[in-house]
Amino acid sequence: MGDMVRRVTTHRPMGGVGDVAASHHAILSKRQAVQSGMTLPQLRAEVDRQTLRRVAPNVMAIHGSPDSWQQRMMAATLTANQAGMGSHRSAARLHLVDGFEDDEHIELWVPRGRRILIPGAVVHQTNVLDDQWVEVDGIRCTSLAQTIVDLPQVVGPRRLERAIDSFQRMGHSLTWLEQVALRNRRPGHPGPKLVLAEIDARRQNGTVRGSWFEKLIEEVIASPRLPPMVQQYVIRGPAGEFIARVDLAFPGVRMGFEAHSRAFHTGTHMEIIDQRRENRAIEQGWLFIYLGWADRKTPKEALAFIERAVARRLRDLGLTVADLTTK
């Protein structure tokens, strides 16, 4: 029997193309594939072999990769020859702006005249796409300041206020936000005017909330039956030493209210810290009440409870609300 020649055809790995996709949520564009050394016939062969699957015009995903918001967002920014960038609510999510963590919008700025063929995508067209963009988690998007300025186009005043709270808590300067807002002023774009008004109000107030939850609690306890309230109040000892800082306080009756968010008051270590500071404050005659997210979901019940608690405290101290508001 003569030697039998056996021909084996092996599939060449995608090489650099796979590396590009791996670093971009398993997504790559046709342009990226070619730049990584793959020819168009090879690219079509990978699609036919189902190694790659088409998710948008000229954009593919690694077959079998899990679908995710990040993957859909990455695909959207790679369409139209990579002309678009994540913006508005999508950019806010990428920047981890408070209140946008679970926002599922696919939202982009694209040059006027370009088309983004992604089902469900919210596309904003513009003639101006300047240097206000960054890359977050591998996805091209507007800068944080530009994102805040754009938000009023798609969200109401409360979400804008919450976003700017988050912007400040991240340590960013209102001057940066102001500069971007001024540069963006143009007809039909309401964001800059609203953002500039919010900046003016914050500069006059001078206080940044420790969390958005404090704002919610302020609304719950905004009642004429309650004495004057102070935000981020510092409790001090007889010699002026620092004891604790509470989210909201009625100093006149020595009552402190804490926005009891799981994000900031959980775990054994935090419990020990809370107990120690509270014990020291209790020695100075303070009373603490915690309010959780459930209290915000039923504001009428929470407000009624707080009014009853403060009324009892006033009786115990032999005071009235009028006594505290006239001092």
Image: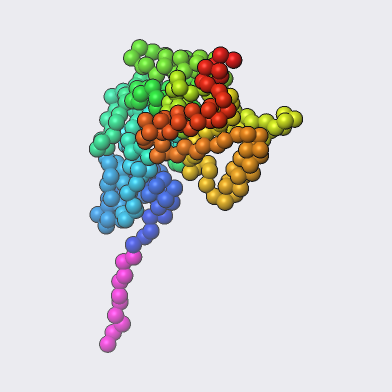
Image point (36%, 16%), residue name: 189
Image point (50%, 31%), residue name: 312
> In the rendered view, does 76 fall on the left or right side of 202?
left
Q: Residue furthest bottom?
A: 1
Image point (61%, 40%), residue name: 278
Residue 296 occupies quadrant: top left
Residue 26 in view in this figure: yes
> In the rendered view, does 272 fall on the left or right side of 290?
right
Residue 250: % across, % down: 55, 26
Residue 274 lies within the magenta run: no
Q: Residue furthest right?
A: 239
Image point (37%, 40%), residue name: 102
Q: Main secondary structure of the magenta part?
A: loop
Residue 139: % across, % down: 42, 38
Looking at the image, residue 42 lies above or below residue 82: below
Towards the viewer: 247 or 190? 247
Residue 111 in view in this figure: no
Task: Please provide the residue range marked out in magenta.
Answer: 1-10
> In the rendered view, does 175 fall on the left or right side of 15?
right
Towards the viewer: 169 or 276? 276
Looking at the image, residue 148 lies above or below residue 18: above
> In the rendered view, does 6 fall on the left or right side of 185?
left
Towards the viewer: 141 or 156? 156
Quadrant for the C terminus in the image: top right
Coloring basis for residues? rainbow
Quadrant for the N terminus in the image: bottom left
Towards the viewer: 97 or 127? 97
Residue 3: % across, % down: 31, 82
Residue 6 lies within the magenta run: yes
Looking at the image, residue 35 lies above or below residue 95: below
Residue 41: % across, % down: 29, 50
